[in-house]
């Protein structure tokens, strides 16, 4: 039951479509408009990946039902998740086009993982519904009009043109060469705690800050169900846990800090840090000897930073990089970390505007 899309064929078709999108300037307007709308602030990040994958499947085989999600749905159905995970995501990294979602399996997400076909999707958020309808209606049109593989290929090229344009825009990242460190820290503090996606920006900031000290920093995805270590950002040396940082944008109590330290110590970490920045937070430093008590109890070093600026001053002070290196590297690393954790485009543009490229 269902149709299988050969991986080698799909890779060849996707590469050819990418090359056409990268070198051309005449694209099917309806499809570029749809792809551009999926980059709006309220658009779910998984829908671009789903659209690219469906059009790729149809460009490989004109018998494909482009609205199918799981192969078991019918004779003309294909596995959206398999093709996206096996071909579209790795090729987007290899070729350099932006799918919006940065995870390895964007289709393993709402609303796709629980349904077999677009026509079955009943539960979707009010904000996401208009975007789902646009994608579903466009793919239904492909089926109704009996798109050939060539017509589907041209639609795919138009969508990839938007993905390439987004990727190119994100590569135009600023470096703050004329900014002194203290000024950059102040700008970063203000940016991170204002606007949208504050929790994501806090975590991105911690990861980017630690990038100035360590060569390999692991930053966990927000609400990642596969988390197996305590904390949001970790340093692992070889297979040995070294440092874990809990990042919080809301008040943290002494009891909550101890719970985190306990879990971290049980996981083998001997350096445990909390970075909290929230107007409602009551300083833990007012609790006499709290960190020392936890260190004795759990046999680890405990570090608490209660603002972005405090954290950055610490990591910059102990970094082996000179001032010029930090000024030229940190803004880019912050941008990359925000991309990684899927901060919305409007916030990333706001960050880039703080550190414009020098002429």
Image: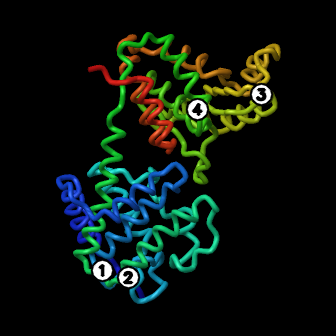
**Upstream in the sequence, badge 2 or badge 4?**
2
N-term-proximal mark, 4 vs 1: 1
* Mark 3 surroundings: few (<14), some (14-19) or many (≥20) residues within 10 A: few
What number is the disc on residue 143?
2
Residue in the image at 42% along x and 28% along y: 353
> Local crowd at mark 2 within 10 Å, few (<14), some, or many (≥20)?
some
Q: Position of residue 216 (x, y in %)?
A: 43, 32
Residue 338 vertical placement versus 148 (above, below): above
Relative placement, left or right, of 247 versus 130 is right
- For label 1, the SS is loop
- Using residue 189 as the reference point, say whether residue 26 is left or right of it: left
> What number is the disc on residue 280?
3
Q: Nearer the viewer, mark 4 or mark 1?
A: 1
In front here: 101 or 312?
A: 101
Q: Which residue is mark 4?
A: 202
Whether the residues at callouts 2 and 3 have beta carbons within 8 Å, the answer is no
The colour scheme applied to this rendered structure is rainbow
Q: Which residue is mark 1?
A: 147
Residue 177 x, y percent position in the rendering: 35, 16
What's the mark number on residue 343?
none
Q: CA distance from mark 2 to mark 3?
A: 54 Å
Secondary structure found at label 4: helix
């Amino acid at each position: 039951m269902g149709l299988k899309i050969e991986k080698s064929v799909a890779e060849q078709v996707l590469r050819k479509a990418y090359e056409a999108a990268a070198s051309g300037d005449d694209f099917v307007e309806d499809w570029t408009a749809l792809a551009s709308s999926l980059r709006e602030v309220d658009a779910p990040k998984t829908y671009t990946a789903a659209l690219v994958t469906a059009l790729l499947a149809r460009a490989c085989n004109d018998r494909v039902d482009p609205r199918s999600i799981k192969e078991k749905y019918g004779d003309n159905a294909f596995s959206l998740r398999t093709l996206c995970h096996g071909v579209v995501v790795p090729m987007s990294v290899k070729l350099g086009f932006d799918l919006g979602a940065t995870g390895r399996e964007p289709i393993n997400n709402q609303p796709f993982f629980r349904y077999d076909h677009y026509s079955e999707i009943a539960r979707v958020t009010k904000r996401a519904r208009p975007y789902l309808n646009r994608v579903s209606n466009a793919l239904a049109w492909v089926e109704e009009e009996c798109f050939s593989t060539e017509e589907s290929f041209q639609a795919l090229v138009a969508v990839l043109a938007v993905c390439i344009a987004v990727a190119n825009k994100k590569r135009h990242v600023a470096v703050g060469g004329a900014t002194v460190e203290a000024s950059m820290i102040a700008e970063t503090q203000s940016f991170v705690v204002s606007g949208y996606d504050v929790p994501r920006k806090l975590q991105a900031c911690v990861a980017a800050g630690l990038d100035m000290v360590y060569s390999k920093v692991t930053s966990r995805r927000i609400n990642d169900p596969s988390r197996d270590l305590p904390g949001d950002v970790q340093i692992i040396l070889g297979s040995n846990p070294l440092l874990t940082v809990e990042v919080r944008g809301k008040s943290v109590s002494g009891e909550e800090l101890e719970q985190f330290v306990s879990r971290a110590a049980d996981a083998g970490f001997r350096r445990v840090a909390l970075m909290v920045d929230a107007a409602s937070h009551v300083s833990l430093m007012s609790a006499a000897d709290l960190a020392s008590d936890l260190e004795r109890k759990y046999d680890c070093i405990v570090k608490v930073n209660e603002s972005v600026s405090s954290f950055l001053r610490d990591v910059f002070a102990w970094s082996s990089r000179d001032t010029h290196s930090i000024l030229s590297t940190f803004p880019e690393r912050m941008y990359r970390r925000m991309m990684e954790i899927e901060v919305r485009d409007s916030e990333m543009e706001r960050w880039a505007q703080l550190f414009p490229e020098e002429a």
